[in-house]
Amino acid sequence: MIKLNNVRKDYRSGNNTTTIVDVDELNISAGEKVAIVGASGSGKTTLLNLLSGLVVADSGQIVIDGQEITTLSESGRDRFRANNIGYLFQNFHLLDGYSALENVELGMLFASGAVKSQRAAEQLTKLGLGERLHHQPSELSIGQQARVALARATVNNPKIILADEPTGALDSASAREALDLLFEQSASHDSTLICVTHDKSVAANFDRILDMGQLQ
Amino acid sequence: MNIIKIVVRNVKRRRLSTSLTAASVALGVALFVAIGVLRQASEQGFQRTAGICDTIVGAKGDSLQLSLNTLYHMGFSTGNISLASFNEIRNQEGVSWAAPIALGDSYRSHRIVGVSSEFFEQVKIAGSGNLSFSEGRSFDFSTEQFVEEHEHLFGEQQAGHDHEDDEHFSYQAVIGANVATKLLLKVGDKIVPTHGVEKSTERHDDAASEIVGILAATGTPIDRAIYIPIIAYYKMEGHATDHEAELEGTRDARGISAIMLSTKSGYYRQQIYRNINNRLDAMAVFPSIEMRKLFKLIGSGDIVLRIISLLVVVVALIGVLVSLYNAMGARRKEFAILRALGASRRSIITIVSLESAVIAFMGAVFGVLLASLAALVLATELHKFSGVTINVSLAVEEIYLIAIVTLAGALAGLIPALEAYRTEAAKQLSSNV
């Protein structure tokens, strides 16, 4: 499903070049739940960004579901991301001024096919937010915001869910609940789940744990 | 959810800045449109009045002054022409009708015009035909009677006879529609003319005239005028006194102020025009050409005003640009989130440019509406001042203007849009803000 070969990403600052990601080989199967752990600055988030196409590798190949995204143009990567990837952030990154329903609809806006409000509403209802469809993010609790973000990431039936510290902003009870929902959703959509976390107890719930320090 | 909804939502979210920038665009557009609409409508209104007769004859002098004084009752007379000249001119081959005009008095700021009854019979207003009466009737005093009485009056006066016993007319008046409504006058009321066309306390008590008719509204300066039998002008105390009558040429108070003349065909029109202008004591002008010249003259000032208003629009669009540009810093995260959701950089450019276009569009539409309102107010004032009714209506040009301003707004939005385009989504998303 996901294959990385000799993928390298450097960051340049003046004359200094720092290698952030340097992965010789990595294979992730379809439907697999993978946790990526590692020290701060080890390149966990950059790896997610490389997989989503938001960042371009300086060298190497990234092939997802038979599509080599490293050879795609920027607009090709954008389309690929819109159609195949659901992104979940630590701070949820819900847009202010948009209701919960609209935030979820945004997850469908740039993908192929029409934006279906009904599907967005169903997704929120499944996550227990049927009564909060038209609430603004600021009117929701942190746990509810996490569920809206999850609904947005999964509304488009993504092949891959990329989650960057999805429980980092939650207390332990909410984190547990969010994680359960994340597993449930990735399973119901047959999505491959790749999750960056610094929390070993969270990582322990995944099929596989990849340590960035050992990966490079 | 679609791009347009995102754009509208963003514009709504910044209500204050949107309102202020749209208002500044509206101001520029309103100025531009109002100047154009009013100029065009005024020219049409003045040309409509100019169509009352094809030629005006008066004493030699300024042709525009003669037209404005005779038809629009503005300014002062160029002088008088003699009755003999009037007779020669009206009897030329090709003259359809010729109406003598005497000007110089007023009643409560409304000009009093001495005419013969042919004036009411012959004058035609473009689009509405002959003059009609909303109440009452015309006075009965023909051009022939005028010529006869004029000769009789001044012949006897010169011979030292008292003319007052020989009057063949009554002091009567026909008033324009505006005069009736503004001064609350009706048939049967009497008006006492005052000497001169500016504020004067010198009343012609001897010439109190009974209103016998009220003209239906014409949308021309006729609505603001008071018409009396032309011979009354010469019979009022102080007019055509022996002393003034001794003056000759254009100062001869026994003369008439102007002649409204209509010819039978274009051929005669040119011929009569040439014949009159070859004379030493009179000139002929085509009022429609004079109005064109006047508006051409005004037009140069008009262009300057329109350039200034366009500059206001440009400055306002720069304001839109600056307002959006300043907001870019705070919106980088929003763009980064959209990019993570699959939005292309082109989508981000489209969103920001459309926001700018929407603000410009709102400003342009509001500006056009504001201009229509301003033009209506100004048209009312122009009507009060000149009697000329102008039809203020929006043309297809205003639709083009809205489209052009909207497009210019979209182009102005490209600068902040390019700033948004450069947003590094990954960098923005990884910050914990």
Image (tube, coloured by chain):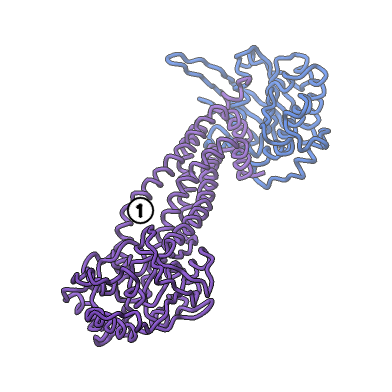
User: Does A120 appear above or below B286?
Assistant: above
B221 left or right of B276 in image: right
Mark 1: few, some, or many residues within 10 Å (few <14, many ≥20)? some
Q: Position of residue A70 (x, y in %)?
A: 55, 32
A186 left or right of A47 in image: right
Q: Quadrant of the C terminus of chain B?
A: top right
User: Does B71 appear above or below A9?
Assistant: below
SS assignment at label 1: helix
Of all chains in the rendering, the one displayed in purple is: B
- How many callouts does the rendering have? 1
Q: Position of residue A113 (x, y in %)?
A: 67, 47
Chain letter of the residue carrying label 1: B
Camera-nearest residue between B349 and A107 = B349
Residue A104 in view:
yes
When asked about the image quadrant of residue B126, the answer is bottom left
Residue A1 in view:
no
When asked about the image quadrant of residue B73, the answer is bottom left
Camera-nearest residue between B281 and B202 = B202
Query: Which amino acid, by three-letter code, is at mark 1?
Result: Asp
Residue depicted at x 32% and y 74%: B234
From the image, state the color of chain A.
Answer: blue
Q: Quadrant of the N terminus of chain B?
A: top right
Residue depicted at x 49% and y 79%: B132
Camera-nearest residue between A115 and B51 = B51
Q: Position of residue A44 (x, y in %)?
A: 63, 19
Label 1 belongs to which residue?
B302
Q: Position of residue A36 (x, y in %)?
A: 68, 19
